[in-house]
Image: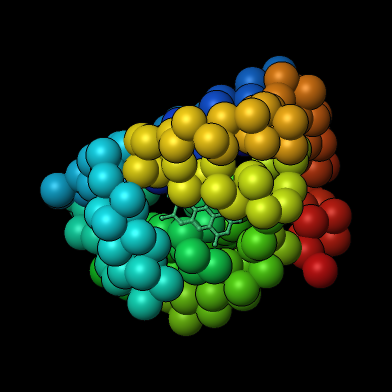
Amino acid sequence: MKPKTVLIIYYSFSNQTLNVVHGLAKGLEEGGVIVQFEQLKPLQPPPFPTDSYIKALRMMFAAFMRHQIAVEKPAAVNSCDWDLVICAGPTWSYHPSGPMLYFLSQFARESLAGRLVLPFICCRTYWRLHAWEMRRLLERAGARVLSAMAVRHPFQGFWCTFGVFAKLAGKMPHFCQQMLQTYCPRFGYTQQQIEAVRNIGLRLAQALSEGNMDEKFRI
Ligand SMILES: Cc1cc2nc3c(=O)[nH]c(=O)nc-3n(C[C@H](O)[C@H](O)[C@H](O)COP(=O)(O)O)c2cc1C
């Protein structure tokens, strides 16, 4: 039987999504699926870290206003009759990231219409508005959209919000270090979470080969 094929289109700013999609791909490949990656590449990549509190705040505000960040036209999307396309990326100020918004508004119709698409969200905590927007934009482009999957950072609460901000700014005020060590000792995902995502990849591979993606992964 012809192996199933999955394209993972992703954007990653601080490499968290990158780690997660590699875990996902590992599971898919173990399940016999051929996986290809397509990274969304901004024409003018935002620097990480921003190296200033003001620039970090400005970036968060622009993201809140759903500011799009232009990306190169992805090459692989139309190169194959993919059985599944996964669109993965971080939540930025409640919304999809600027590069993903640009991709969806500029290229989704020509590349994703009629295709089965799984939105995959990497965030600290909040993902529901992001998931709703992904569905709306993908459906508008004519895609067949599965229920979004979201992976949240292992630690929550104020100090973790602050931790993400400090990472973004690339600055860590001395008086905060102790609090962060106590309440948010880690930025990003744990190895156990990556392992859990690998298992999701295996389940996806199984559903793809059984031909029941719609029943298993659609709300
Ligand atoms: C500008 C910006 C805004 C963010 N806003 C949110 C948010 O509203 N909700 C949330 O849960 N996480 C938010 N985050 C955290 C990221 O979604 C999270 O760290 C994610 O794992 C980053 O993935 P990446 O490294 O692939 O970019 C934000 C991060 C950045 C850089």
Q: Position of residue 38 (x, y in %)?
A: 37, 38
Quarter of the figure with the N terminus: top right
Report whether 117 appears left or right of 215.
Answer: left
On the rendered structure, is 193 left or right of 65?
A: right
Residue at horizontal 56 percent and vertical 37 percent from the top: 176
Farthest residue in the front direction?
175
- Quarter of image, res 192: top right
Image quarter of residue 109: bottom left
| Residue 30 against residue 67 in the figure, above or below | above
Q: Quadrant of residue 146?
A: bottom right
Res 7 visible: no
Residue 181 is situated, as x and y percent measured from the top left of the image, at 67, 27
Residue pictured at 65% horizontal, 46% vertical: 159
Q: How is the image coloured?
A: rainbow
Residue 93: tell me if it is visible. yes
Which residue sits furthest left?
A: 44
Q: Residue at x 53, y 35 (%)?
A: 175
Which residue corresponds to the image point at 66% horizontal and 61% vertical from the top-left?
126
Which of 182/105 is in front? 182
Q: Is residue 169 left or right of residue 187?
A: left
Residue 205 location, x and y as percent?
Answer: 73, 34
Q: Nearer the viewer, residue 29 or 62?
A: 62
Q: How many marks?
A: 0
Work out whether 40 lies above or below 115.
above
In the rendered view, tell whether residue 140 sits above or below residue 190: below
Q: Is residue 64 above or below residue 17?
A: below
How far across and down, in percent of the image, does residue 144 sit? Answer: 60, 68
Check the picture and name the quadrant holding the C terminus.
bottom right
